[in-house]
Amino acid sequence: MFRTIVLSAYGVLFAVATAVAPVAVAAQNEGMGIVVMHGKGGRPHAPHMTDFVERLERQGFAVANLEMPWSGSRNYDVPVSRGEEEVAGAVTDLRGKGAKKVFVAGHSQGGGFALHFGGKHDADGIIALAPGGNVGGAVFARQVGDALARARKLVADGKGSEPERLADYEGKRGSYPVVSVPAAYVTWFDPDGAMNIPRAAKAMNPKTPVLFVLPTNDYPALLKSSPGVFRALPKNPLNKLYEPSADHLGAPSASVDEVARWTREVAAAQKP
């Protein structure tokens, strides 16, 4: 009988401990906000993004999960400047709801755009999850160069606001058609523009730290190019290269705990 009572008591203690632990973790992240952007052709509620967002929310973060202009349903419907405004608006909204620290995170193309955003707008930190979609390389020039030239001509001819069948490219998928507004399209595919990822990395605000996630099983092209992109970032003692054991789509979920740890580290370092 004594053993039964002792086991029951331990069961109660264990139940209390497991119930309290998530509450304690959430309390650590109170007042922290994260703006999240999906990848090329994706959507906010794709399974890998939903898992990332829900796990962050369970850890106490306030999250804005955005649908960006490169989603599968928007197809570059607005120019880069409007995309920046959408993210900046979400940052402001989270601050208005009480977030004292707000980070901007993006996966794949969203990660590349997060780096661009961090060079032009205020955020407490940038989280680039397997960033990709560099339009400044030779591959994009071959795959979408003709479409970009046609879009530029349409703009010059005064037809930039009329939707047109153009082209996009993703390594695993190859080149594929998108119906887009030429005047907006050219801002996204300009090889010297926002989605030139090495250039965006170099132009980052040196005061804004970056968590750069490079999964060990990422696409070969990104495994080759990403270390150089990370090295191109302005020096900041809080910059971190994190290499989880995951593939490209698995990078967000594999990084949740590191995102939580790193954002707390940044928040503590930034206290006056």
Image (tube, grey):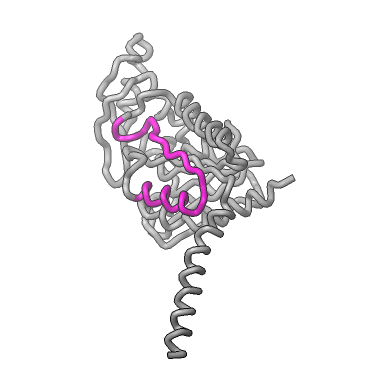
- Would you place residue 238 above or below residue 176 in this image? below
Query: Is 159 located above or below residue 171 in the figure?
Result: above
Residue appearing at x 35%, y 9% in the figure: 158
| 71 inside magenta stretch | yes
Residue 253 rendering spot, x and y as whole percentages? 41, 55
When the figure is inspected, residue 88 is found, relative to residue 51, above or below; the finding is: above
Q: Is residue 24 left or right of residue 186?
A: right
Asked if one can make out residue 27 in the rendered structure from this viewpoint, the answer is yes
Q: Position of residue 1 (x, y in %)?
A: 42, 90
| Nearer to the camera, 183 or 84 | 84
Which residue is at the front of the view, 226 or 79? 79
**Residue sitting at 65 percent across and 48 percent down?**
236
- Whether residue 62 appears in magenta in the rendering, the answer is yes
Question: How many numbered marks are there?
Answer: 0
**Nearer-the-camera pick, 245 or 189:** 245
Tell me the quarter of the picture where residue 146 sits: top left
Give percent across and percent down for residue 111: 46, 43
Task: Note whether residue 241 is visible.
Answer: no
Residue 24 placement, left or right of 47 = right
Report whether 233 appears left or right of 62: right
Q: State the residue at coordinates (52%, 63%).
A: 20
Nearer the observer, 169 or 264: 264
Q: Which image quadrant: the C terminus? A: top right
Q: Position of residue 259 (x, y in %)?
A: 52, 53
Q: Residue at x 31, y 24 (%)?
A: 180
Where does the magenta region start and end? 48-73
Q: Residue furthest right?
A: 272
Q: Is residue 256 above or below residue 103?
A: below
| Residue that sits furthest to the top in the current view | 158
